[in-house]
Every structure is written in C-alpha cells, then in structure tokens.
Amino acid sequence: GAGVSQSPSNKVTEKGKDVELRCDPISGHTALYWYRQSLGQGLEFLIYFQGNSAPDKSGLPSDRFSAERTGGSVSTLTIQRTQQEDSAVYLCASSFDRTGIYGYTFGSGTRLTVV
Amino acid sequence: AQSVTQLGSHVSVSEGALVLLRCNYSSSVPPYLFWYVQYPNQGLQLLLKYTTGATLVKGINGFEAEFKKSETSFHLTKPSAHMSDAAEYFCAVRDGDTGNQFYFGTGTSLTVIP
C-alpha cells in the first residue's frame, strides 16, 4: 500500500482480556518497528523486525507482550491479560532498510484503552 | 546510551514569529538525527533528517535544522510560524547505521497564536 496501515484505529477492552493489533507496512520495506506512546511521554521502543532475522524484542515491557511478522510483511502485536497501564497509542513504523537512513514511515496508530 | 532531550514540552509563538524547538542528544558514534511532526490523531511524519554531509538541513513546510557537533544539538527552526504548524514535534537520534532503533525525545507541543 501507499502507507503504513494499522488496525483497529481504536480499541477499548476490559482488563484481563487479550488484544491483537495489526500493522501492514509499506510494500518492500524490510524493517518494521512497534513503538508505544503514552500520554505526555516520548515514544517507547517495543520490538523490531528486519527481514528474516530474529526480532529485537529488547523493548517489550513484559512477557504479556509478543509480536510476530508473517512472510516479512504484516505484523501483529499481541497483549495478553491487558492491564490499565497498557493504555496507550501503539505506533507501527516501517523503513526501507535496517540503517534507518531514510527515516521511518509511521502508521496512524491504534489507541488502546483498557477499562 | 543514546538519549534525546527536548527542552520545553510546550512552546507558544505568535503567527509570523520565529519558531525554535530545541533538541540535544547523546550518542557514542556519529549520529543520524531526525525531526518528526505529529498532527492530532495521526502518525508521525518525517520533517527532515541529518545523516552525513551538510550540517544545515532543510525539510518540508519551511523547517530547517542545524547539526552542531560541539553542542550536541539539532535545533529545529522556521522563520515565520503559520497556524498550520501547530502540532507535536519529536526529535530522534540513531547511532549512525548501527543499532536497531531510534531514540525519541518526549516531544514539544507547538501552539501558534493568531
């Protein structure tokens, strides 16, 4: 597609439920990133995928968070047993290659609210 | 460790006035530096970037930024603010072409007063 597509745009879930957030990167972009943006905070790195390499999961805040990227394209971020502190905007970004020299292209994000 | 500091979480300027948004970084190697803009309910959009070469870089919408190694700064400027410039601005740093991520500042919210 022309841009990075994320769905859903908004998600309200009850505490304890699992949620799945989807990211469809720009076609041909080999690198894909997930960031979390909390109110008044900067962007917090979560996970990075590059081609067929093992993902960099160093930013995942707990084992309730996981992500996968199928076929080097679409990625799903899963949060299990959601907590109120998980409420944030989850942003996906892709880039042409791993160097980042071209910058990222961001999606519009998924606003997650845990009630 | 890499880090980015944006001085001033909120900046207000009058329409037509100079915009100056400050960014200082720390990096152990020559950095790549970026400014992104975020409009309400949208993702981040790349404004400009410095990787190598000329230290004064020009971006979209009349913005520019200068990489000053001695000051570890990459401040964003625009000579004359427009109402449409009201948004959140994020500075980001990456250690050259190493590492796996950008490090973002906490953002500066720009308000333009008519």
Image: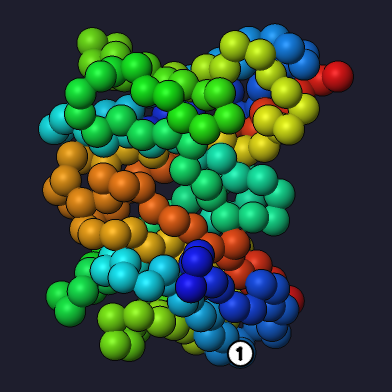
> Which class describes the residues within 10 Å of circle 1: few (<14), some (14-19), or many (20+)?
few
- Residue type at mark 1: give it: Lys
| Mark 1 lies on residue | A17
Location of residue B87 with respect to A82 vertically, above or below: above
Location of residue B24 with respect to A93 vertically, above or below: above
* Residue A30, image quadrant: bottom left
Q: Is residue B69 visible?
A: yes
* Residue A64, image quadrant: bottom left
Q: Position of residue A99 (x, y in %)?
A: 20, 51
Q: Is residue B1 visible?
A: no
Which residue appears farthest toward the right when viewing the image? B114
> What coloring was used for the rendering?
rainbow
Q: Nearer the viewer, residue A23 or B3?
A: A23
Q: Residue at x 63, y 51 (%)?
A: A39
Q: Position of residue B102 (x, y in %)?
A: 33, 47
Q: Residue at x 35, y 80 (%)?
A: A73
Q: Nearer the viewer, residue A19 or B85?
A: B85
Q: Chain of mark 1?
A: A
Count of numbered tags: 1
Q: Residue at x 28, y 81 (%)?
A: A72
Q: Residue at x 40, y 80 (%)?
A: A75
Q: Position of residue A57 (x, y in %)?
A: 28, 70
Mark 1 element type:
loop
Location of residue B95 with respect to A11 vertically, above or below: above
